[in-house]
Amino acid sequence: MFDLNREAREIQSDKDIAWEIYKKSTTDMIGLYTLILCICVIFILPIWVNFDPLTQNVAERLLPPSWSDRGSLHHFLGTDEFGRDFLSRLLIGAQNTTKYAFLACFASLIIGTSFGLMSAMSRSRTRKGVLHHIFDILFSIPSILIAFITIGILGASLPHAALAIGISLLPRFIHESYGAAKKELEKEYVRAEISDGSSRLHLTFTTILPNILSTIISNMSQGISIAIIDIAAVGYLGFGAQPPTPELGNMLASGIDIIYVSTSKAIIPGVAMIVLIASIQLVGHGICRVLNTGVADAA
Amino acid sequence: MIEFLVKKLELFFITLFILTLILFWAHIRLGDVEINKIIPEYIHYAGNLVTFNFGNSTESGMPIIEEMKLFFPPTIELLLLSLAVSFCFGIFLGIVGGLNHHSVLDKCVYGFCLLGSSVPVYWSAQIFILLFCIYIKIFPTTGNISMLYDVPRYSGFMVIDVFIQGNNEIIIDMLKHLTLPLISLSLVPCATFARITRRATINLTQNYFIKAAYCRGESRFDIGIHHVLRNILPDIVQKLNIIICNLYSSCILVEVIFDWPGTGLWITQSINNSDGRIIETTTFVLGTSFLLLNITLDILSTLVINRTRLTHG
């Protein structure tokens, strides 16, 4: 029997099909909504928050959050040890951390993927080896140690921490894109395209890159979460953002100094970070699932 | 095989050379080097590094190699213990989750993996301090042994030294000091191990020999031990170097939080004192040891695992 619905389903666009597949998993949907909410709260809400995150008010030091007995709704999450409003500090701090983490991860992604693809596509053995192994030394040094060297050379600040974390993410992207492209090159349709006489550049952009997209995206979601954790870790040790600037890491570090007086200051920035990172990972997982649907050897 | 070994060693020496170059750049920025004599300076510097002639620390005036002997054992102790703990628990959780795919248990394991990879280690350490040192006062917060006890130094590893001395009270004190750093350090690699193992197990259980084992009536436990564990070990060994590398990163943070007298605390203090010498030498020693570890794992996996041996030819 002729089925109108089926006909209609077949002429759906790719976007609709992808959205249909994405919608199937509840956890991924929760992740997506949380991520959108997080980004709105972090990047748009500070426009309307009246408190300056740097203005100190000694009269209102260490106020607890508004839901506890002594708290006031005026400062929703209370104030820190200098009387600065904690909510606006948290928002601006999360904005700083996330901004630099995205920047570091994207720069590292673009450079790393192009290096990996170049090394996978090049015919000469030496060029392949050099491009593939040039950053191997970074792979064997822990990321915080790379940050220490960078900060030792350039001095402590948030952009330098982001630079260091970006450098430490490079070899990961290189290796993953190299491996994925190498696996792709052995497939038959790629060989058919090569024997059709397509140029290396054309082959890279039309066949290889779209097919390794799921690897790149899953790496990117992991890379961003690692970048957020590591930039905050460098900040936690006191080598990232310097004191008046709020940042999730140095807020946690000042939270542990006053943990005997006010416990909420040591907990809240971490919770914000966990929500952000978990939602990023869920969305990355979901996008990967969409791209891998129907692929036989999907990992 | 010999060709493979030579290739690996070649790579090792090239990366070592790049490492000394980077450190020399740091040395130029931190110390005073005459620009017109840069090549002899570099040869002198690299020669000193390679022969373990590190000079003295500017802060304490002690030879750096002597300080290293003090600070390295506690770090290695913490790293190895946490690796062992997370390896056992992570693989157990991963196999349990993978064998019961789509069940509630599996969802719990997946949730744990997700949570473990998104919880920063310094935050969980703070929460443990809050719970177990401030609300319930059962664990101490700082150091690896109480100041009151005098433990003679045999090997430098506190766990071994305490057991050689054999005083029950001191052993309990040491275990109390060890618990919180160990747990907070083990959470993240445990989740990573669980994630890798779960994924590998799910892929493996689609094979016919697992189904055949089920049909033979073998119990889940037997299948997990005899069939799954052996077949997923290659996947784990390949990721082991990245896990150890990340473990060291979090180890630095845990040492700073719990005042564990290891290399992490030492490096952070030396950065605060802007003691460039210590940063350079520690990076050199750690980088070299991680490089050696990578190569050992590579060779090990090539020797042990058939699949990679075939691809290397």
Image (spheres, coloured by chain):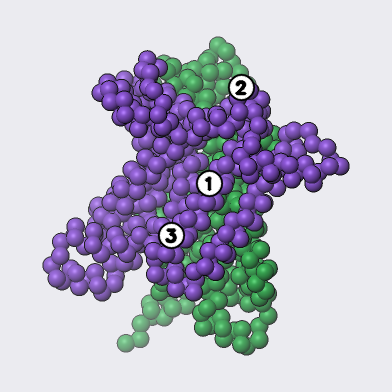
Find the distance from the CA under tag 1 to the CA under tag 3.
Answer: 16 Å
Label 3–label 2 contact, CB within 8 A: no
Chain label for disc 1: B
Q: Is residue A20 visible?
A: no
Residue B300's mark? 3
Q: What secondary structure is found at the residue carrying circle 1?
A: helix
Q: Amino acid at mark 3?
A: Leu
Q: Nearer the viewer, residue A220 or A126?
A: A126
Residue A166 location in percent, x, y?
A: 62, 48
* Chain coloured green in the rendered structure: A
Circle 2 residue: B60
Closer to the N terminus: mark 1 or mark 3? 1
Q: Nearer the viewer, residue A177 or B311?
A: B311
Circle 1 residue: B289
Residue A277 location in percent, x, y?
A: 47, 45
Image-based side of A248 in relation to A25, left or right: right
Image-based side of B123 in relation to A242, left or right: left
Residue at 66 percent across and 83 percent down: it is: A198
Tag 1: Cα neighbours inside 10 Å, few (<14), some, or many (≥20)? some
Above-or-below relation of A135 to B255: below
Q: Using the rendered image, report if marks 3 and 2 lie on a common chain.
A: yes
Q: What secondary structure is found at the residue carrying circle 3?
A: helix
Residue B239 location in percent, x, y?
A: 44, 56
Residue at 45 percent across and 49 percent down: it is: B243
Label 1–label 3 contact, CB within 8 A: no
Find the distance from the CA under tag 1 to the CA under tag 2.
Answer: 25 Å
* Chain coloured purple in the rendered structure: B
Tag 2: Cα neighbours inside 10 Å, few (<14), some, or many (≥20)? few
Label 1–label 2 contact, CB within 8 A: no
Residue positioned most to the right: B36
